[in-house]
Image (tube, rainbow, N blue to C red):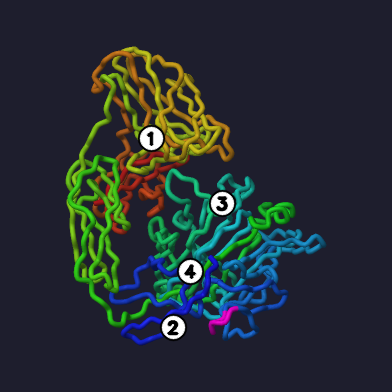
Amino acid sequence: MKKVRLLVLFGLLTGVSVQSQNDWDGIEVPADAGSKQVWELQEDVSDDFNYTLNPSTARTFFGSREGVDGSSSNAVKNKWYNYYHQNWEGPGLTRWRHENVSVKDGQLQLITKRLETPDLKKFLHNNVDFESQATRLGCISSTKQIQFPVYIETRAKIPNAVTACAGWLLSPDDTQEIDFLEAWGGQYARNVFFGSNISLADRLHFSHHVFIRPPNFEDYQPKDATTWYTGPVGTKTYWHEKFYRFGVYWKSPTYLEFYLDGKLVKVSNSLDNQPGLDGIDPLNITSPDRTAANRTGLNKPMDIIINMEDQDWRAAQGSTPTDEEIKNFPDDHTMKVDWIRVYKPVKALDFVDATSVSIDSENFSLTIGETTTLTATVEPSNASDKKVSWSSDKGFIASVDTDGVITANSEGTAIITATSNDGGLTNTIEVTVIDTAPTTAGDKELVIEAEDFNETGGTYDGFGKFAVNGKAGINFNQKGDWGDYIVNIPATDDFKVTYYIGTPLEASRIEMLVDGVSVSNVAVIASGWNDFVALEVPTRITLTEGEHTIRLQGAGSNADDWEWNLERFVLEGTKVLSVANFAVNPDKNLAIVPNPVKNQFRITNLKSDDFDFTIYDLSGSIVKAGVVNSDTNINTDLLTQGMYFVKLSDTNAEFTLKLIKE
């Protein structure tokens, strides 16, 4: 973002100094600096790029530390230079070039080029030699290193290209690395993970590496499910569409927190592997003698690197940009960085203690499934630490997340508490949750909640469950995925079918089968993934008295086979019957015990030896994953109070269960 530089004088008890306004002013550092500590901006490695740097074929230092815009040949006086931190031109088909770096319009810009004349490059992947025309890309490195404890964040726009873009930290000896941004943003069919059908355009990678360099090369990085982020459940986010903030708090050699737009999305807090979470150095690579006792973790000073890459594993599978894509869509192949900011926690001078905390609400009621957001205010207004944490004494009734969002889970009363980070001051309110059953039209309707399927499966392993805007439903639905619902019909009747369904896509369809026979196949009107609209099937279906299996499945023709989200469907008969006579029979065999849970739980009646499990919070973030059987106890100490979904899968089936953490 381009703006005019202003110099302002500010007087504090610590003295008078001069400070420039920055583009990130007013955006709070999301990580916790610690008790009686504040975040201090590291100006010599922070930059909002509000100056001009023209492309140059020579190594150029830029980002003056002396308040003068422009470039020079002096590394001490400048923050960056337009190349990688070693004499290496990049992986795979990458050729980092000085002239592919510029600063204009208030942004750092890293561009992609390919020569029309021969510019071949050879590379080795999985012991196979490859050769093709090189891809010329931009890369910058910092002239100073940073070291824990430190928070770094960049606001950047991922290119709509199959090349990688990255924001990372790397030690000068190339043995320790932290990746706080790694993405492949291009919406192309070939932009997939290792030749699979898993698109990379809607995924972000948060990770780290520790290396032993040649001749005895080793490279360890975690590969658990938490290293990939795909956005909230029920949505498909293409990360190239706008600017996002990517950050990491490198708190210690054994503790990393990764942030996206100020939201914590991943934590690495152990040298060793934990259930569902790979460790920082489980192979003892950072130990000089390869013993666990002498591991250092991520302890070395590191350079800041921002770049684009045409990586070897991508180029080897054909996921490299074409000449036409680069030539015709240059903006899609440009990584843009609005700013980079770096902070360190320091002891607060003239710390102003918090004296009270208040909540912007009196006691109130919610119905099951509803949500609302509370705001807490710390006094005095100039308190140095105004952060609060939220908790519920009965999360299985009403849970609360880190942003003060209350979710009503089950009938009863819960106490919600706001606690100040400084001093532990508290304030509370009471939330009463009411159970209100769906209304019926003259006792003729059977309302079936979409998430209450008995079984799911299909081409892409079946439905997932999610909750949004106070409503639960199913998502992760692609063509050929299905869910089965077992119903008991008290008397033969003709039923009108109404779906409460949402999709942003134009070619989605929903098919209903009764006892294996197709009875309807209708187009879904495009609205939005979570904009559930009523869709009536044009003709009634006949259900005879007794038990039936109703199967709903995706049957459209969209790219990538994505279909629709479903909140519920309704069968409305012609006869006035007691709703109590209808019965939806969800699978009662699989169960979480105990539920609600305090410290650990197990899953009963698993029919295979091992199931993969993944635990999601209500935002869709993965909080835990691993392998489970009926004898496994899953620890929940790191889970906060509230509702979660536990997804179980093996080679034959997939199930989703609801978990309540007290």
The magenta segment is 64-69
**What is the crowding at mark 1: few (fewer than 14 residues within 10 Å), some, or many (at least 20)?**
many
**Foreground disc of the pair 4, 3:** 4
Give the alpha-carbon distance from disc 4 to disc 3, as whole Å.
30 Å
Q: Which numbered disc covers residue 23?
A: 4
Give the alpha-carbon distance from disc 1 to disc 3, as whole Å.
27 Å
Identify the mark nearer the N-term, 1 or 2: 2
Residue 76 as seen in the image, left or right of residue 250: right
Amino acid type shown at disc 1: Glu
The rendered magenta stretch, by its main secondary structure, is classed as: loop
**Foreground disc of the pair 1, 2:** 2
Query: In terms of secondary structure, where does tag 2 sit?
Result: strand
Identify the mark nearer the N-term, 1 or 3: 3
Question: Could you tell me which residue is drawn at 46 percent across and 45 percent down?
Answer: 235
Looking at the picture, does residue 400 appear above or below residue 208?
Answer: above
**Which of 507 and 91 lies nearest the eye of the viewer?**
507
- Which quadrant would residue 36 be assigned to in this image? bottom left
Residue 495 as seen in the image, left or right of residue 523: left
- Write down the residue under mark 1: 567
Identify the mark nearer the N-term, 2 or 4: 2
Amino acid type shown at disc 2: Val
Looking at the picture, does residue 314 appear above or below residue 596?
Answer: below
Residue 333 as seen in the image, left or right of residue 576: right
Number of numbered discs on residues: 4
Amino acid type shown at disc 4: Asp
- Write down the residue under mark 2: 18
Is there any visible trace of residue 362 in the rendered image? yes
Amino acid type shown at disc 3: Leu
